[in-house]
Image: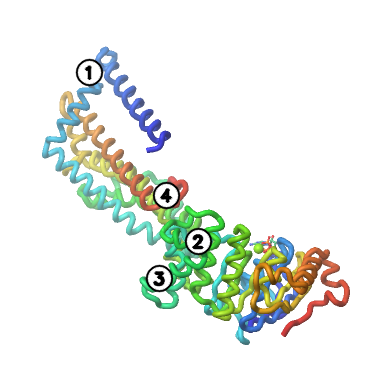
Amino acid sequence: MSRRGRRDVGLGVLGVLLAFGACEAVSRAGIVRRTYLPPASEVLARAVELAGDSAFLDGIGATVRAWALGLTLACVIAVPLGLLLGSVPVVEAAMRAIVEFLRPLPSVALIPLVSLLLGSGTRTEVTLIAYASVWPILFNTMYGLRESEPLAKDTLRAFGFGRAAVLWRVELAGAAPFIAAGVRISAAVALVLAVATELLSGFGEGLGIFIAQAQLATDGTRDVLAGVVWAGALGLVVNGVLVWGERRLFPWAPERRAVRT
Amino acid sequence: MLRLDSLSQSYGEHRVLRDVSLSVPDGQLLCVVGPSGCGKSTLLRTIAGLLPVREGAVTIDGTLVTGVPDRLAVVFQDYGRSLLPWLSVRDNVALPLRRQGLRRAERRAEAEHMLERVGLEASARRSPWQLSGGMQQRVAIARALVVRPSLLLMDEPFGSLDARTREDLEDLLLEVHRTDGATIVFVTHDIDESVYLGDRVVVLSAGPDSRVARDLPVGLPAQRDQIATRGLPEFVALRAEVGRAVRAPARAAVLGPADAEPEQAR
Ligand SMILES: Nc1ncnc2c1ncn2[C@@H]1O[C@H](COP(=O)(O)OP(=O)(O)OP(=O)(O)O)[C@@H](O)[C@H]1O
Ligand SMILES: [Mg+2]
C-alpha cells in the first residue's frame, strides 16, 4: 500500500473510533436515554453475537441473494441497452424523454406501487433492486462509449475491421472501466433498495425484516442498530471488493471516473 | 496505381487541400513534406478512406475509393492513442492479423518476429502505456508492417525516435519496401529523411488551399546507405531543392517561376 493509502486508512480508522467514542459517551453520560441510544459497545457486541444466530444469518443470506439477483438483472438489461443507446443516436433521441422522465423518480417511492402489483415477496424486491440499479449502469455505459478513443476506432477500421468488431474491440473494451464503476455505484443502490423494500413490506425474511421486527420489540433499539451495523458492513465489503476488482482488471484506466445518477 | 484527381478537402468552411492531383505507381515510396497544418494528415486520412472525399476522386487501380482499401495499413501521427491500452504490446501488433484468418499462435509468432525487428522483443508482454513515446511509436510501426500491406500510409512515423533508432527504422522500412514492394505514402517534416527514403518527394504548399508545389523524382541509387547516400552530391542538391520549396511562401510556390510548376511523374 502506498504511503498515501496507508494515511487514508489511518484517518478512516481514526474517524470510526471518534464516532464510536462519541456515541458511547453520549449514551453512558445519560445525555440520551439508553433505550433511545444504547452505548456503541453494546450495539457492536450484539452485532457480533448475531453472527452466530442462524436465523439472522439466513436473513442476511436472503437479502444478499435478492441483491445479487437484482444487480445481475440490472447488468443484463442496462449494458446492452446502454450500448444500443450509446451507439445508435436515433434510438437515443427516441428514448431520451422516457429516460429523463423515469430517472428522477426515487426508486424507494415505487415500493408501494410495485408491492401492489407484484405482492410483497422476493419478486417485488428483485424488481425494485433491478430497476434502481439499471440507471447508474446504463448511464456509465453510454458515457463510456462516448469517451472511446476515435483514433483507436479509425485504426481498426483502417485495418479492415467492420462496425461490429470496432464496437466490440474498441468501444465496449474502452467502456468496460466505466461500466464497472457503474456496477459499483449500483451495488450500493441495490443494497439500499433491498433493505428498504424488506423494511416496508415487513414480512418474509431478510436484514430489513430483522430490523423491522426489532423495531416493534421493547428495548429493540439495540437490535435495530446492530442490524444497521450489518448493513453498513455489507456495503463496505461489497464496495471494497469491487474497487479492488476494478484496479486489477483495468490498470490502464487512469482515474475511475463515473457518472452518478 | 493510386491516383488522386483534383482532390479538394475541407472541414466545413475550413479549406485544406485544393486540386491535388497525383499518380502513385504500384511499389513507389512517395514522401510528402509540407509546412505544419498544410493538410498532410488530411491527405492520408482521405486515401485511407476514413474521410469522405469532398471534391475530385481517389482511385486505386481504377476503382473509386469509397471505404477503406484492401490490404491497407496506417501508422497515425498520434500513435499513442492508436494503440489499445487493454492489450499487451504483442497482442496490439497481432490484432490486425485476425483479418487474415491466422490462428492465435501464428498471429503471436508473427507479432513477436516483427517486434524483434523494431527492437522491442523485450517489451512484448508489457502494456503500451508502460512504454516511452518512441517505443509506442515502434509498436505502431510493427503493427502496420506485420500485415504486409499493399498500401502503407505513414504519418511522421519516426518523429519521436532518437537519431540512431530512427536511422535503423528508416533502413528497416527500405528493406521491407524492397522485399514486399508495397506502395508507401510517407509523410514527414524532415527534409533529409524525405530525400533519403523516397523514390519521389512531393512538397505541399502552406494551407489553406494547399496544393502540390513541387513534385521531384529522387534519382538516387535504390540501395541507400545512411552515410554514403547522404554525402552524394545529388542528395545534397535534392535536399536543397526540397528545402527551398518548403520554405517558399505559398503564393510563390504555386504561381512562382516556371520550374516550380508541378511536374507530373507518371
Ligand atoms: N477534424 C478537424 N476539424 C477541423 N479542422 C481540422 C481537423 N483536422 C485538421 N483540421 C485543419 O486542417 C488543416 C490541416 O490539418 P492536418 O492535420 O491535415 O495538417 P498536417 O499537414 O498533418 O499538419 P502537421 O504537420 O502539423 O501534422 C489544419 O489547418 C487543421 O487545423
Ligand atoms: Mg499531420
Mark identifier at residue B109: 3
Q: Name above or below for residue A96 compared with residue A22.
A: below
Residue A10: name its quadrant.
Answer: top left
- Please tell me whether mark 2 sits on a helix, a strand or a loop: loop
Q: CA distance from mark 1 to mark 3?
A: 73 Å
Q: Taking the image as drawn, is residue B262 in sight?
A: yes
Identity of the amino acid at label 4?
A: Arg
The residue to which callout 4 is attached is: A103
Mark 1 packing: few (<14 Cα in 10 Å), some, or many (20+)?
A: some
Identity of the amino acid at label 1?
A: Arg
Question: In which chain is the residue bearing label 4?
Answer: A
Q: Quadrant of the C terminus of chain B?
A: bottom right
Q: Name above or below for residue A242 compared with residue B216.
A: above
Q: Position of residue B93 (x, y in %)?
A: 46, 67
The residue to which callout 1 is attached is: A34
Q: Position of residue B120 (x, y in %)?
A: 48, 61
Question: In which chain is the residue bearing label 3?
Answer: B
| Residue A213 placement, left or right of A160 | left
Question: In which chain is the residue bearing label 1?
Answer: A
At 18% from the left and 36% from the top, the residue drawn is A210
Earlier in the chain: of badge 2 and badge 3, it is 2
Identity of the amino acid at label 3?
A: Ala
At 37% from the left and 57% from the top, the residue drawn is A78
